[in-house]
Amino acid sequence: MANHASKDFLVFGQPKIEQPEIDEVVDSMQKAWLGTGPKVAQFEQDFARYKGVDHVAALNSCTAALHLSLLAADIGPGDEVITTPMTFCATVNAIIHAGATPVLADIDPDTFNISPERIKEKITSRTRAIVPVHFAGRPCNMEAIMAIAHANGLKVIEDCAHAIETEYHGRKTGTFGDFGCFSFYATKNITTGEGGMVIAQREEDIERIKVLGLHGMSKDAWNRFGDDGYKHYYVVESGFKYNMMDLQAAIGIHQLKRIESNWHRRSQIWSQYMQAFEGLPLGLPACVEKDTRHGYHLFTVLIDQEKVGISRDQFLSHMTEKSIGVGVHYLSLPEHPFYQKSYGWKTEDYPNAALVGRQTVSLPISAKLTQQDLDYVIQSVKNAINF
Ligand SMILES: *Cc1c(COP(=O)(O)O)cnc(C)c1O
């Protein structure tokens, strides 16, 4: 406990906030334009350029992006949507909010990404879409997944919450599927505090998402209160309140400018971890696949009590005692009582995800980490497992 007091706690996934975004937020405050406006439009443009796409919409979360993508794909009650058990609960909750039934396909034990073979086994006459998650920033096998989708007439909605920078065979993630959904939550690769973005192949899908994201109104508030005369709005759908604010976009515009330098820093941290832990009895992430670019969002180690001598949860406690914030990404979704009760999911039916979920620990990989922080984390991991 003395350690807690003597050393600042290393907050897991702490974002790197710099002066330009602070000034930009202040600028919004001084102009007193806080809601959806010119800064959101600018952030959308910048993000579209970064991803090399035409149709994007900024929203207030990736969860909203997933939800509206499913609605824009006309997915609803009676439809089944296949996704992975190794993801954040928001992925399946969005499917449920769209009225559809989530169906899980187990992961590949090496990559932790959804297995195309397991997807094939779960396709029924009701299946309408696949939601692959590029776990930790490693791209899914999009060649196989898109082939399955085409062969079965399925939509693909990529959950790119970990994977803004990720590429697969020379192409950026989020541009394979009908939709790609991104998160700017505080711990993600770039942040707006809370925030999300969706990209779509078809312009009409983005138009529909923009309408659904702001109450189902035909014109957004920015156009409504501009200086070119009052315009009536008409409600054309029963929509949601999912729009991004200029206050959020103010942060995002500058975060996006540093996306590559932060990625580079995380890739260095990743390499240092890999080198430092080589030969230790820890499960390390699979090597980066050739002809892909990893997003380096999470660095996970597996703690197998048989090999390491302590349990995963003991390891978590040890790191926390050393004032190091660690994470668990994730307990497999069937571990949660709601899904067991509602869908009859059993942990043991998804053995690969179950094993990862019970052994995994995410170590800090924020671009904010100093070399001193990193050395301290590495030493603490070695101490925890007596090396
Ligand atoms: C963070 C996360 C989400 C949700 O993102 P929000 O922006 O917080 O809604 C969805 N899927 C995955 C895999 C995530 O990690």
Image (tube, grey):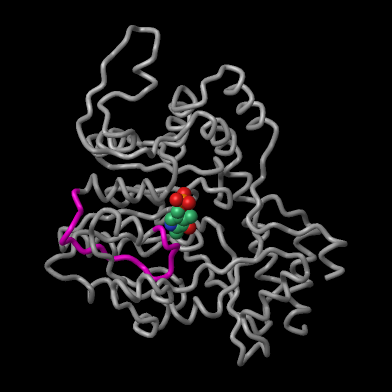
Q: Position of residue 144 (x, y in %)?
A: 29, 65
Describe residue 385's horizontal placement relative to residue 4 as left or right.
left
> Total of numbered circles in the picture?
0
Outermost residue, left direction?
125
- In magenta, the rendered stretch is 74-90
The N terminus lies in quadrant: bottom right
**Residue 58 to residue 304: above or below:** above
Q: Position of residue 202 (x, y in %)?
A: 24, 39
Q: Quadrant of residue 360?
A: bottom right
Q: Quadrant of residue 337?
A: bottom left
Q: Position of residue 319 (x, y in %)?
A: 72, 71
Outermost residue, bottom direction?
306
Q: Quadrant of residue 343?
A: bottom left
Point 45% across, 36% down: residue: 47
The C terminus lies in quadrant: bottom right
Point 30% across, 54% down: residue: 97
In this orientation, does residue 292 appear? Answer: no
**Residue 217 to residue 156: above or below:** above
Dominant secondary-structure state across the stretch colored magenta: loop
Q: Position of residue 131 (x, y in %)?
A: 32, 59
Residue 69 covered by magenta stretch: no
Point 61% across, 92% down: residue: 306
Q: Decide which of 374, 271 is in the foreground and name it.
A: 374
